[in-house]
């Protein structure tokens, strides 16, 4: 072990922490892992932050969650359908005041309790606690704790919104054979988190499209559980462009909109696609409506500022105003951190 400038001691089972100034480490396995997780959670007086891809049934009571604690998980449509994650538990945690975020490619399992952290193999589930042979490492190394806290903050860009949670509850299927089905995001691009930057301008939609448009709107609105806080915004595109066909429910959309001829574009908060309606209108034009879950009250940012943010992340927008899809997760994190609904919300 390299020198850290601190004395390193190991926390022996049953002995507790020796000197508060020392760095303590302990390898945990079997029942000792969950006994330690629950003990640290109960005693923690600072904000807890938990990152696990899967959240199982009855898992909201496994730890002592409090208001403003953080849970980062992989609440995707695929994981819900496969039974890898139980959306109803997410709802219970949100009712407790826990701030829940989603990240589709999450695989880490990290439990941060103030100034102590457990890095382990355990998901937040009763099967992990009662059936599986899990291991982990407990430490209070301040360098490690600081790095992990920064790791969390960099990934809290996609809050689980009511409409998306409702959709995941609707498609949820119990796991078969005692466990969920694995999903491979690297091999199947359809399961990969995608963030789109799309350009448009404010306009009234053609009245002769209202019947078809309303059908799509009503279908998406079924998942809108908190209409006083969230709303469905619509984006209309004409023509059979590749990006129009590729955008799917669950993708994130960053709208860049020009509201008048003289005004510059404004950048809206990121929103998740709850529905999509495509049809040929009476003029024979192929039309696509996207129905995007958005907060009712938000602020926008200037296009020049957004260009700078994107450039810092390695994405050059230029002046072409062409739709772009972002697949790189590091780039997504940097950009979404500045345009997430939480970042741009109006109080």
Image: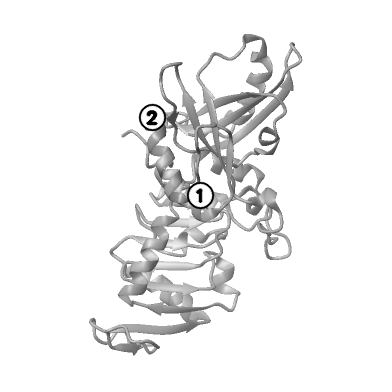
Residue drawn 41% across and 60% down?
A: 152
Corner quadrant of residue 345: top left
Residue 44 seen in the figure: yes
Percent x, y of residue 265: 44, 27
Percent x, y of residue 167: 60, 41
Percent x, y of residue 212: 69, 18
Residue drawn 68% across and 51% down?
A: 189
Classify 116 as above or below 274. Answer: below
Classify 232 as above or below 142. Answer: above
- Distance in Å between CA atoms under marks 2 and 1: 23 Å
Classify 319 as above or below 330. Answer: above
Query: 330 or 82, which lies in front?
Result: 330
Corner quadrant of residue 238: top right
Corner quadrant of residue 107: bottom right
Q: Is residue 132 left or right of residue 32?
A: right
Q: Which residue is mark 2?
A: 297
SS category of the residue bearing label 2: loop
Residue 341 seen in the figure: no
Crowding near the residue tagged with mark 1, few <14, some 14–19, many ≥20 C-alpha atoms within 10 Å: many
Crowding near the residue tagged with mark 2, few <14, some 14–19, many ≥20 C-alpha atoms within 10 Å: some
Colouring scheme, one of rainbow, by chain, secondary structure, one colour:
one colour
Residue drawn 39% across and 31% down?
A: 300
The N terminus sits in image quarter: bottom left
SS category of the residue bearing label 1: helix
Query: 25 or 65, which lies in front?
Result: 25
The C terminus sits in image quarter: top left
Q: Is residue 347 left or right of residue 53?
A: left
Percent x, y of residue 157: 45, 49
Q: Which mark is residue 332?
A: 1
Disc with the residue nearer the chain's start (2 vs 1)? 2
Residue drawn 54% across and 73% down?
A: 121
């Amino acid at each position: 072990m390299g020198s850290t400038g601190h004395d390193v001691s190991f926390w022996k089972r049953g002995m507790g922490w020796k000197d508060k100034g020392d760095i303590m480490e302990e390898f945990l396995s079997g029942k000792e892992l969950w006994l330690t997780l629950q003990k640290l959670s109960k005693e923690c007086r600072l904000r807890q932050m938990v990152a696990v891809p899967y959240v199982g049934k009855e898992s909201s009571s496994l730890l002592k969650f409090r208001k403003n604690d953080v849970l980062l998980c992989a609440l995707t449509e695929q994981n819900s359908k496969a039974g890898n994650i139980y959306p109803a538990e997410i709802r219970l945690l949100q009712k407790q005041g826990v701030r829940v975020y989603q990240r589709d490619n999450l695989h880490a399992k990290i439990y941060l309790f103030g100034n102590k952290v457990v890095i382990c193999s355990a998901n937040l589930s009763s099967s992990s606690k009662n059936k599986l042979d899990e291991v982990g490492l407990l430490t209070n190394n301040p360098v490690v704790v600081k790095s992990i806290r920064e790791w969390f903050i960099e990934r809290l860009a996609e809050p689980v919104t009511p409409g998306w949670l409702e959709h995941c509850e609707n498609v949820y299927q119990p796991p078969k054979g005692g466990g969920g089905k694995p999903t491979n995001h690297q091999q199947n691009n359809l399961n990969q988190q995608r963030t789109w930057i799309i350009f448009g301008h404010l306009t009234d939609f053609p009245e002769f499209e209202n019947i078809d448009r309303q059908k799509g709107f009503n279908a998406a609105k079924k998942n809108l559980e908190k209409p006083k806080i969230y709303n469905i915004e619509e984006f209309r595109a004409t023509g059979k462009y590749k990006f129009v066909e590729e955008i799917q429910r669950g993708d994130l959309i960053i709208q860049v909109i020009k509201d008048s001829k003289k005004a510059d574009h404004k950048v809206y908060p990121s929103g998740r696609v709850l529905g999509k309606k495509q049809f040929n209108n009476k003029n024979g034009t192929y039309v696509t409506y996207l129905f995007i879950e958005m907060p009712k009250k938000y602020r926008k940012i200037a296009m020049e500022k957004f260009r700078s943010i994107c450039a810092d992340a390695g994405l050059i927008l230029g002046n072409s105003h062409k739709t772009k899809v972002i697949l790189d997760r590091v780039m997504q994190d940097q950009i979404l951190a500045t345009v997430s609904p939480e970042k741009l919300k109006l109080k």
